Amino acid sequence: MSVLKKFFKDTIIYGLATVLPRLMNFILVPLHTGKLETSSYSDNTTFYVYAAFFNVLLTYGMETSFFRFFNKSEEKNKVFSTTFIGLVITTFLFLALVIIFNQELSGWLNIAPKYFNILVGLLVLDTLVVAPFAYLRATGRPIKFAAIKIANIVIYVLLNYVFLWAIPKFNIDFPGYDKSDLVQYIFIANLVASVMTLLMLIPYFFKTKLEFSTPIFKQLLNYGWPIMVAGLAYVINENFDKWILPYLLGKDINGAYSGCYKIAMFMTIFIQAFRLGAEPFFFSHSKEINAKQTYALIMKYFVIVGSFMLVFIISYLDIFKELLVKDESYWQAITIVPIVLLANLCLGIYFNLAIWYKLTDKTIYGMYLSIVGAIITIVFNLVMIDKIGFIASAWATLAAYGIMMVLSYVIGQKYYTVPYDLKKILGYLVLAIIVSIISLNTNANYYINTFLVLLFLACIVLLEKNELKQLLNR
């Protein structure tokens, strides 16, 4: 099997592990937006904003560090066990601190104590499975990885429907059920799913002899701490808008904004699937003679697929809107979707470019770039929300990821030159933006929009047909 075919195979399998759960989450968007008022949906969003932030803190870059040192180390089992033991120790230290300062922390975060306790349980469970999941990816077991991920989301989705739909509809007698606080059951469903995931991964806790190496742990920390800072900055880029909007414009606006933001998850799914397959591949392939040419080729096709998704979703935006966000009170924020889609495509390109600082062990640059993005996000939101409303948050996201993308390319070419086909990459991006703008101004005329989608697809096939034939024949 050629290198590229193996890459695409693994990416497809890892993609299923990401796409199917996210698609099932799409099933939940109509349920959540239908059952929750915009203010309650805002509470749901805030809960997961904090979850994302603390997940980065508790893993402190160890997942990426693990991939880096697992692939180049002679003592692979020791790298895994050191990573696992380190995460277990720090997670239980975190739990001990939370137990001691429980009331103070929940008050400081402005989260109801019962929500906060569920959040802590979720964080602990999800951190404990980071190393086993990374081990499955690093040892080339994408099917097992995908099966457990999919099982997790199936449990989560089913419990959501039980709590939010079945119990109220059929008047099921469920002890302690509170119809006035439905959002808590979303969190409980997630907690139960995480418990089941931990149980499924317990055999991998003992796959190797558990021994802790202080020198290896220091290496993991030195490599990983800039990634942690970059991760925190990324969380700010992704979630600062959803955190600040309730304070500046109210929970109702934030709920509508967050609900419409979900439509852009199609692009997020694609990016996440790519990252899951690409990161281990990029590290393992780095010593090959043609590595840089392979990275350039992958980048081009990433942009092609991402650009097509941008055009397709925007061309049929009204359909996606009615399918996913049925409550019209949320539609006041629908104008953010095209901007957020383009922003996420820029983010995906940035993730692709990021291989230069990961392979050259200059992860400090990833931290710097993410901090630049976070500063842009914070300043733009604080200055512009009062002037132009919630749309400022979408533009802030695009500005942050766009600038990070450009800076990463310029700096990366100095340290690790990759022969990206800039002419075609920029051409596809510009063409996708032009087609998207035209489709937004056709008054949802799907005959015209379908023609535009097919025209864009035809341009891709015409320009890439020879290379595609070569790739398929390898």
Image (cartoon, rainbow, N blue to C red):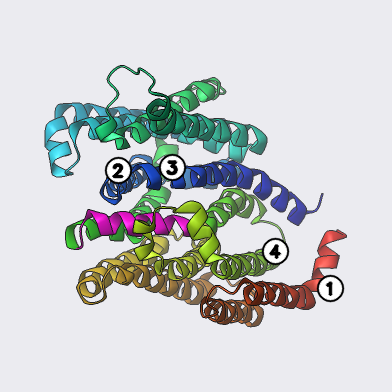
In front here: 402 or 131? 402
Where residue 274 appears, as percent x and y from the top left, is: 59, 54
In front here: 25 or 446? 446
Res 434 quadrant in image: bottom right
Reply above or below: 58 against 96: below
Q: Depth-wise, is mark 2 or mark 1 nearer the camera? A: 2
For disc 4, the marked residue is 294
Where residue 466 appears, as percent x and y from the top left, is: 84, 73
Nearer-N-terminus badge (4/1): 4
Nearer-N-terminus badge (1/3): 3
Where residue 208 appears, as percent x and y from the top left, is: 56, 23
Q: Secondary structure at mark 3?
A: helix
| Residue at the image point whose x is 72% and y is 64% from the top | 290
Please tell me whether the stretch drawn in magenta is mainly helix, strand or loop.
helix
Task: Measure the C-alpha gap from mark 3 to mark 2.
Answer: 18 Å
> For the residue marked with disc 3, what is the amino acid?
Leu
Res 126 quadrant in image: top left
Does the CB distance between marks 4 and 3 fall below 8 Å?
Answer: no
How many marks overall? 4
For disc 1, the marked residue is 466
For disc 2, the marked residue is 47
In front here: 428 or 260? 260
Q: Is residue 84 visible?
A: no
In magenta, the rendered stretch is 249-264
Magenta stretch holds residue 154:
no
